Image: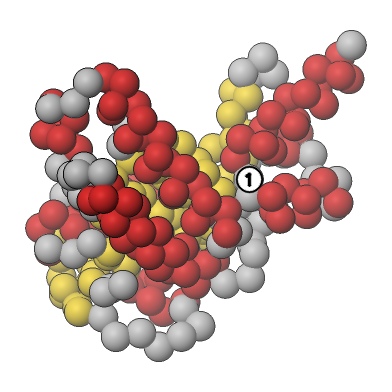
């Protein structure tokens, strides 16, 4: 009975968080996530959120809001999984994804940027579909940062949660928020741009003051 419950918990953990190819690799290599202690990893962290969601939702019925969020999250998850990412959590209209957990999948910063591209392409398609139904267009913001995080399971055996924590996560969330101030739809940090396999043209926002931090950062507006 205990073994069956452990297997069920493992399967729920894998199905909930990880892309199919990542899940298959975990199973093939027999990595037991439930028993893994937290460890330091370099990870690309992505946050997205819907622009003007609060005002938009005020004019909608609760069922319509739920449908909107469900459709949006489905688009985000598909792009994340296509690029070997992990869905960390949904926070209202925001999505947090990680690239490089529970192990690196090559160039994790590049995977995160490729994911952002896929997201924007899918969002434009969704915008067309909504327009045809006379529904308001939905746009969103994306912020990506790369750095050291603590990755692993926290909690008790009864309630175990796979978590990614650290300053990198906080900064990524604030980079997404900084899209409001910079007029960008997609913003990446220097640490992301430096890790890319490709040369991309970006619009530099130098010495940007991240809310709640003393150190200023160079951010890059990416047009997708």
User: Is 25 located above or below residue 16 in the figure?
Assistant: below
Say which of 194 and 222 sits in front: 222
Residue 67 appears in the rendering: yes
Q: What's the colour scheme? A: secondary structure
Say which of 149 and 140 sits in front: 140
Q: Is residue 122 left or right of residue 32?
A: left
Residue 214 appears in the rendering: no
Query: Which residue occupies 46% across, 78% down?
Result: 196
Query: Which residue occupies 82% across, 26% down?
Result: 7
Query: Which residue occupies 86% across, 19% down?
Result: 4
**Residue 20 coordinates in the image, percent (x, y):** 69, 50
Judging by the rendered image, the residue that carries numbered circle 1 is 18
| Residue 91 image-quadrant placement | top left
User: Which residue reaches farthest top?
Assistant: 1
Badge 1 local density, few (<14 within 10 Å), some, or many (20+)? many
> Which quadrant of the figure contains the N terminus?
top right
User: Is 154 located above or below residue 179 in the figure?
Assistant: above
> Which quadrant of the figure contains the C terminus?
bottom left
User: Which residue reaches farthest bottom?
Assistant: 199
**Residue 101 coordinates in the image, percent (x, y):** 60, 52
**Residue 220 coordinates in the image, percent (x, y):** 25, 73
User: Is 207 located above or below residue 39 in the figure?
Assistant: below
| Residue 117 image-quadrant placement | bottom left
Q: Is residue 205 left or right of residue 124?
A: left
Q: Is residue 146 left or right of residue 19?
A: left
Query: Which residue occupies 67% across, 37% down?
Result: 15
User: Is 108 located above or below residue 16 in the figure?
Assistant: below
Q: Secondary structure at mark 1?
A: loop
**Residue 44 coordinates in the image, percent (x, y):** 47, 60
Q: How many marks?
A: 1
């Amino acid at each position: 009975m205990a073994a069956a419950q452990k297997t069920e918990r493992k399967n729920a953990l894998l199905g909930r968080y990880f892309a199919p190819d990542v899940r298959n690799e975990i199973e093939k290599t027999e990595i037991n996530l439930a028993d893994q202690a937290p460890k330091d990893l370099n990870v690309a962290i992505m946050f997205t959120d819907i622009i003007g969601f609060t005002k938009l939702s005020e004019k909608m019925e609760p069922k319509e809001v739920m449908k909107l969020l469900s459709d949006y999250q489905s688009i985000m998850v598909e792009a994340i999984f296509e690029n070997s990412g992990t869905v960390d959590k949904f926070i209202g209209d925001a999505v947090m994804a990680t690239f490089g957990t529970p192990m690196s999948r090559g160039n994790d910063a590049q995977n995160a940027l490729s994911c952002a591209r896929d997201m924007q392409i899918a969002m434009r398609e969704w915008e067309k579909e909504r327009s045809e139904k006379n529904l308001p267009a939905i746009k969103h913001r994306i912020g990506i940062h790369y750095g050291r995080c603590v990755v692993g399971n926290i909690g008790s055996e009864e309630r175990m949660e796979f978590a990614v924590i650290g300053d990198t996560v906080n900064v990524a969330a604030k980079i997404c928020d900084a899209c409001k101030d910079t007029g960008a739809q997609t913003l990446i940090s220097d640490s992301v741009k430096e890790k890319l396999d490709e040369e991309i043209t970006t619009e530099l926002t130098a010495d940007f003051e991240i809310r709640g931090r003393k150190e200023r950062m160079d951010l890059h507006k990416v047009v997708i």
